[in-house]
Image: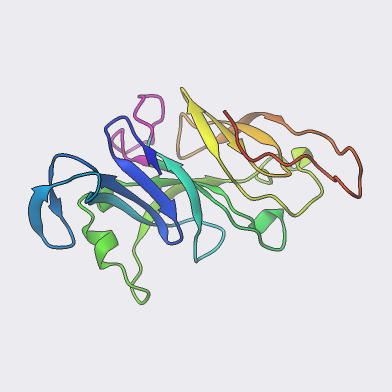
């Protein structure tokens, strides 16, 4: 869970990312009535399933809604971009978990997430997604442990950990077009026992 500058707590997990208000009066989409939110009984205000993930049954590891005025998406109001990381290990780097940029616009109020079912699932509209194999094949390590993990944001630079793919710095000023501007990956100390350094977090 990560709390944004407006006080909304974004909870990531199996099934997507949901934003909860822990204070103030809001309409509760579960009941359709207005009530005061508390930390022990918060109210769902936005979010839901995440589109654009590598795996249809997503496991979202963490998330962040930038409210610093540095992250934008053309045609969208600022404050509606949600960044999330998907932790998923598949058969290769091309299909492992990604960083996904979502549009929160139609999720506000929580009704769509509340009404989501396996037969008719709700997914936020993806703006973009990124993985180390996207446009930077020369920087990837020769292992299959390439999932996204923790990240942090400074201004419009996203520092993201990618297990064996090291730390990637992305310019996310345009959430529809994230691009790598730098990377750091420790080379192997032993090609058999330690084929690549594993990065869990980036601060």
Residue drawn at x 69%, y 30% as measured from the top left = 183
* Quarter of the picture holding the C terminus: top right
Query: In the picture shown, does residue 16 fall above or below 157?
Result: below
Quadrant of the rendered image containing residue 141: top right
Q: Is residue 58 left or right of residue 115?
A: right
Measured as percent of width and height from the top left, residue 172 is found at 49, 32
Query: In the picture shown, does residue 128 fall above or below 177?
Result: below
Q: Nearer the viewer, residue 136 or 121?
A: 121
* Quarter of the picture holding the N terminus: top left
Secondary structure predominantly adopted by residues drawn in magenta: loop
Count the numbered circles shown.
0
Quadrant of the rendered image containing residue 150: top right
In the image as oriented, which residue stretches furthest toward the left?
Answer: 34
Measured as percent of width and height from the top left, residue 180 is found at 62, 33
Q: Which residues are magenta?
A: 66-81
Residue drawn at x 66%, y 34% as measured from the top left = 167
Q: Does residue 157 show up magenta in the picture?
A: no
């Amino acid at each position: 869970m990560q709390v944004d500058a407006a006080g909304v707590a974004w909870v990531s997990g199996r099934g997507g990312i949901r934003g909860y208000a822990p204070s103030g009066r809001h309409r509760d989409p579960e009941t359709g009535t207005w009530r005061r939110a508390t930390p022990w009984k918060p109210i769902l205000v936005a979010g839901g399933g995440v589109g654009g993930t590598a795996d249809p049954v997503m496991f979202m590891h963490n998330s962040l809604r930038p409210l610093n005025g540095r992250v934008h998406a053309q045609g969208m109001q600022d404050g509606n971009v949600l960044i999330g990381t998907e932790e998923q290990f598949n058969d290769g780097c091309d299909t492992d978990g990604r960083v996904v940029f979502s549009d929160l616009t139609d999720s506000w109020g929580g009704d769509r997430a509340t009404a989501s079912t396996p037969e008719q699932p709700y997914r936020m509209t993806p703006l973009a997604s990124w993985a180390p194999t996207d446009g930077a094949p020369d920087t990837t390590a020769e292992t299959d442990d390439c999932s996204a993990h923790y990240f942090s944001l400074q201004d419009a630079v996203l520092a993201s950990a990618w297990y064996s793919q090291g730390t990637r710095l992305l310019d996310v000023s345009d959430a529809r077009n994230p691009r790598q501007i730098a990377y750091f990956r420790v080379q192997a100390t032993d090609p058999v026992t330690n084929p690549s350094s594993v990065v869990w977090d980036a601060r």
